[in-house]
Amino acid sequence: MRIPVGDFDLEMTQRSGQTSQPPWREVEGAFRELLIIEGVPCPVEVRDEAGVLRVRPYVDVPQKTLREKIEYIFDLKFDIEDFYTFLEDKNLSYTLDSSRGLRLFLAKDPFECVISSIASANCSVVRWTRSIEDIRRLWGQAHTFNGETFHTFPSPHVLAGVAEDSLEDLQRAEDNLPSDFRFNDLRSCGVGYRAPYIRETSRILAEEMDIRRIDGMDYDDARELLLELPGVGPKVADCILLYGFRKTEAFPVDVWIRRIMNHIHPGRNFNDRSMVEFARREYGEMAGYVQLYLFNHARRSGLLDRLRQGTG
DNA sequence: GGCCAGGGTAGCA
DNA sequence: TGCTACCATGGC
């Protein structure tokens, strides 16, 4: 299948650290991941070919559904030229030097996005992505195609029932430890003190709150709901809304966005609240994309490093 | 070995 | 509301 795309940089989108999911498995310039298409597990390989995205499913699945899923995940229906014009109007077109073609990398599984976003808090990208991959390997369903194994992300019900730390893990195993015993707890995935947040959020989503409700809710109501989850604060909630549910009014404010926004608006002295108000007023439904381009540009242009050293 | 990671929470004024 | 200490842990 070949999907015509406008400006789209698959590799940059994969590596931009969006908390919907870890980057897909890269094999010779293409990216592979397991998708569920109408209930059927189906690994898919996507490859960027100058204006066209080539999509190769490993098994026979309905083409229309697959196409819609790919178009959703990479936000291919987003009118990016229109966004470029918007950036120009807002005097932000310099971000295109490094970020042209970057799009949202949306969740293939909203629950995975919730846990990824919680795991990303105060944590490097390499570390939280590894944690998510470990969680998949330990508790997801394995599917092997031509000797290549992929794992689903576990359901809220499964993740709610796992051990939190190795002590609890050992207690479960009691004293008849098998010789090949391996730790099978959340902390062994490197999530640290976030382990109880992840387990309790999983329990709530398994028993009390249907995450799919977010789709039909407006931004403010959805945000309020997400903030009830342990481990979900303002920044994580906005990441879930933006990368998990495509609420593009969301403007996740992290340490870097604080520095960048105060750098490009000298004298304004934003606090978090005034920054979010400014973003919603100035950028509206483009706020999420503006945040994506600002962060990516600063990171790739070296501005972030200069800001970190206080010489920006 | 100290500092930093795309922060959240609890405790306090 | 606004501020602060504390929280695991891997990478550099």
Image (cartoon, coloured by chain):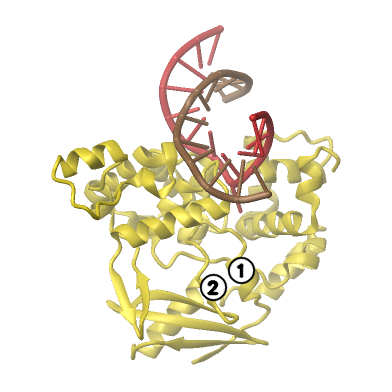
Chain colours: A yellow, B red, C brown
Which is nearer the N-term, disc 2 or disc 1? 1
Q: Chain of mark 1?
A: A
State the residue in front, A290 or A179. A179
- Is residue A251 visible to us here? no
Q: Quadrant of the C terminus of chain A?
A: top right
Residue A54: name its quadrant: bottom right
Q: Residue at x 25, y 48 (%)?
A: A162
x, y (%) of residue A305?
Answer: 77, 47
Q: Residue at x 50, y 70 (%)?
A: A24
Give the residue at the far front of this rendering.
A179
According to the image, label 2 marks what residue?
A74
Distance, label 2 to label 1, CA atoms, is: 8 Å
According to the image, label 1 marks what residue?
A13
- Is residue A130 visible to us here? yes
**The disc labelled 2 sits on which kind of residue?**
Phe
Q: Chain of mark 2?
A: A
State the residue in front, A236 or A132. A132
x, y (%) of residue A126?
Answer: 56, 55
x, y (%) of residue A242?
Answer: 52, 57
Task: Left or right? Give the position of A309 relative to A56.
Answer: right
Task: Please report contact status of discs 2 and 1: CB closer than 8 Å, yes or no.
Answer: yes
